Amino acid sequence: MSNHAQKSVSLRKVLITGAGGLLGTPTVKAFAACRATKALGLGHRELDITNAELVRSQVAAFGPDLVINCAAYTNVDACETNEAAADRVNGEGAGNVARAAAACGAKLIHLSTDYVFDGSGSLPYTEDHPAGGPSQLCAYGRSKLLGEQCVRQNHPAAIIVRTAWLYGHDGPCFPRAILNRARSAEPLRVVTDQIGSPTYAPDLAAALCKLSDLDVAGFFHVTNADRCTWLDFSRAILQAVGLDVPIEGITAADLNRPAKRPAFSILDNGRYIAATGSALRPWREALSDYLASLPNTATPTGAGSA
């Protein structure tokens, strides 16, 4: 057998759904950079995961060794008035992907969220902590919990990764919104009574690469290290780029959004750390890199200090 043929035989094929999104885009880049890996990213236009037959045929045609489901309906407030659509994408669609992956013998990593918990706790949520009841969760949380159930039913060996407070370069996110409001001189009113771990999408994508190399299954919680409130996060963003803009701290009730958010979103990363041997870096370090890479942004000077 020639060297070329040997390389072809050992090539790992990875299919990523939701490839044009906040997490899907850096995930495609991360796997494409891996040695002996062929990564295929499919956005919503190429693959509507609510179409079971299309998912089955597309996955079968590529013949992946690994499928990563980053596709999701993530507009949390819109889910309140479009819960059926959220269930189709985040629930039934996730099940379609899981079924197709299992049918061709592919490993599966599915992305989920802290919103499956009611947020009333005070200790970091472990993977074994019970999810919130239907009345305790918003529509988005219920749809993502349905997705977890559909994935486990159709692909029992799947890896389900829960994360929180995700931001990055490839979609709407909190840091960009804060910077835009600050530069337009709009009033800044930011919630003080919700706590989480801001998670940088490229860091999470790298974590998915690590998990994909391991013989593991089940739930993993993965976020950047350390915690803050949304107000703390906002102040770190503005300080890092040298914007001295006043911020008014408010409660979630003051904001009066349609969907209920978890007040406490800290996820225990112990299982991921034990499996991979390392934690994701602190969120302030990741934020510094994110801000440094933005166009027309001052060089960050304080993202790691205040």
Image (spheres, rainbow, N blue to C red):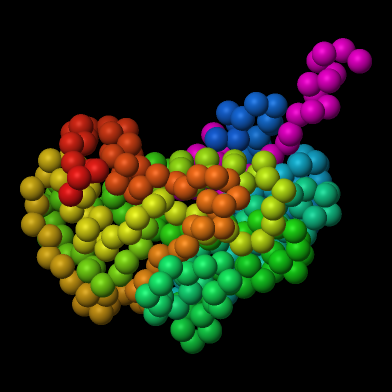
Q: Is residue 164 left or right of residue 158?
A: left
Residue 285, x across and y down, in percent: 32, 42
Number of marks drawn:
0
Image-based side of 2 in relation to 236, left or right: right
Question: Can residue 51 be seen from the camera position used here?
Answer: no
Q: Considering only vertical position in the picture, is 63 above or below 253?
A: above
- Residue 97 quadrant: bottom right
In this view, which residue lies farthest toward the right? 1
Compared to residue 257, the image places residue 286 above or below, namely: above
Residue drawn at point x = 30 percent, y = 70 percent? 194
Magenta-colored stretch includes residue 123: no
Image point 83% across, 49% down: which residue?
104
Q: List x then y, in percent, for residue 40.
A: 66, 37
Residue at (65% x, 35% y) in the render:
39
Front residue of 168/273: it is 273
In the current view of this chain or complex, which residue is farthest to the top? Answer: 2
Left or right: 233, with 72 as reference point? left
**Residue nearer the viewer, 1 or 215:** 215
Q: Which residues are magenta?
A: 1-29
The percent coordinates of residue 298 (x first, y second) are: 18, 33
Which quarter of the figure is the N terminus placed in? top right
- Residue 154 seen: yes
Q: Is residue 9 magenta?
A: yes
The structure residue drawn at horizontal position 62% and vertical position 46%, both measured from the top left corner, is 211
How far across and how far down the image is residue 185, in percent? Answer: 10, 52
- Please state which of residues 90 and 233 is positioned toward the viewer in this rendering: 233
